[in-house]
Amino acid sequence: MPASAQSVNDGQIILVTPEGDVLDYVPDAADVIVRTNKRGQRVLIDHYGNLVATEMRPSDLGGRRSPRDGLPGVEDYARAGGNNAEEDPGYFPRAPQPDSQESTGSLPTYPDNNEGYQDQPLPGDGIARDNTGDTDMASLDPNLPAVEQRQPDPVITLDGKKSQYEITALQVFLDRAGASPGVIDGKMGMNVSKAVAAYDRITGETLDPNNIEELMTRLGYTGGLPIMEYQITAADAAGPYVAAIPEDYAHKAALPGMNYTSVTEALAERFHMDEGYLKTLNPGVDFTIPGTIVKVVNPGQPKKAEVARIVADKFRKQVYAYDAADQLVAAYPASIGSSDTPSPSGLHTVERVALNPNYTYNPKINFQQGNNTKVLTIPPGPNGPVGTVWIALSKPTYGIHGTPDPSRIGRSQSHGCIRLTNWDATELAKMVKPGVTVEFID
């Protein structure tokens, strides 16, 4: 769900993301630290030092629209309905709503992402009010025992100022080892920190992310330099592409496919990149001309193994894949549930795997999307609601799937399911089969 769904009244305090959207949920106490910035505003920061949201009043937003084109502003948005159990035999995965939490932003002003903030107790003066007039932030429970709060993986800090190329080298090194950093963008962040911790568990060695010289040497043995040249082909330029992906599901269903919207979007996914980073590496380049030489990331080859069990860590927003010997073989940043539509807990199993699936929207068993009252079949494609993969779980309506927006993975939350980047979801799908266990841990 777009973030502009929080119910607001003038004078009430709301939570606004770094991108300017309004959160439609209140984070759990274990997930955030509450502090005051230099402007005197209270801010919510996750345990990796990333800014989640800032307290503001609706009047501070001025009624402006979301910075993302076509999305509603605070006054415009109406929350969609809930999800029910799967009933229609023709229904494929459950219809997830759009993200309920926007990407968190880093705090580049402060070297350790914490300096410059004053520690604050958990809010008790009301960020969101319920219909009883209670202003207490119920899900941020100040009485939560410290023993119940899990510790995150250490935040990775680099010595001195590393170039974008050097950070890209680190991300590519991790990607090739099966410790996915998500989209490769030449920037440090919590997905990179989580990938470094996963790398240590996968290989049994301790990676020094500051030793770029050693990383560059080792990259030479696993596929070459982190950036390579690629020649755009006639097939790349031809597509097929669509002009834009509409929000309305009826309009989605009318498209021939949920295809990429541009050559840059297609190439970015192929090479595990952030689309903006691809354009930055190639300033002024026309990607639509066959024969054009461009710079792209040189990522790892798909991991090959037989996965016996999967662990979905909701606290770390990470998915771990283990083989029959209980050896960790791959780890992926993930968007797993939200406070209003949480993921399940406990043990479940993989029931079926589908690559490039279509998607059936059924308003009788799903949320009400727009004015759509009929069953709609949305065609396959990377920009479909579940991306290029659907791994159905024994828990009805839940699954592991891809996403049309890979840059938000690990930084946003989903509506109960497990979202991975399309390339990570595809890699995992080819290593699992029905009967593999999937355990959700808090």
Image (cartoon, grey):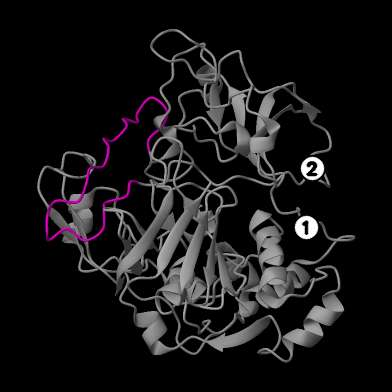
Q: Amino acid at mark 1?
A: Ile
The span shown in magenta is: 72-97
Secondary element type, mark 1: loop
Question: In the image, which disc is placed on residue 156?
Answer: 1
Is residue 74 inside the magenta stretch?
yes
The residue positioned 45% from the left and 41% from the top of the image is 338
> In the image as oriented, which residue stretches furthest toward the top?
133
Is residue 251 toward the left or the right of residue 284 in the image? left
Give the label, 2 or 1, closer to the camera. 1
Q: Is 66 or 8 nearer to us in this picture?
A: 8
The residue positioned 59% from the left and 22% from the top of the image is 56
Instruction: Indicate the position of residue 106 as horizontal and vertical percent values.
Output: 69, 47
Q: Amino acid at mark 2?
A: Thr
Q: CA distance from mark 2 to mark 1?
A: 17 Å
Q: Marks 1 and 2: in contact by CB < 8 Å?
A: no
Q: In the figure, residue 217 lies in which quadrant?
A: bottom right
Query: Can you say whether 315 is above or below 333 in the image?
Result: above
> In the image as oriented, which residue stretches furthest toward the left?
374
Q: Which residue is mark 2?
A: 109
The residue positioned 56% from the left and 15% from the top of the image is 126
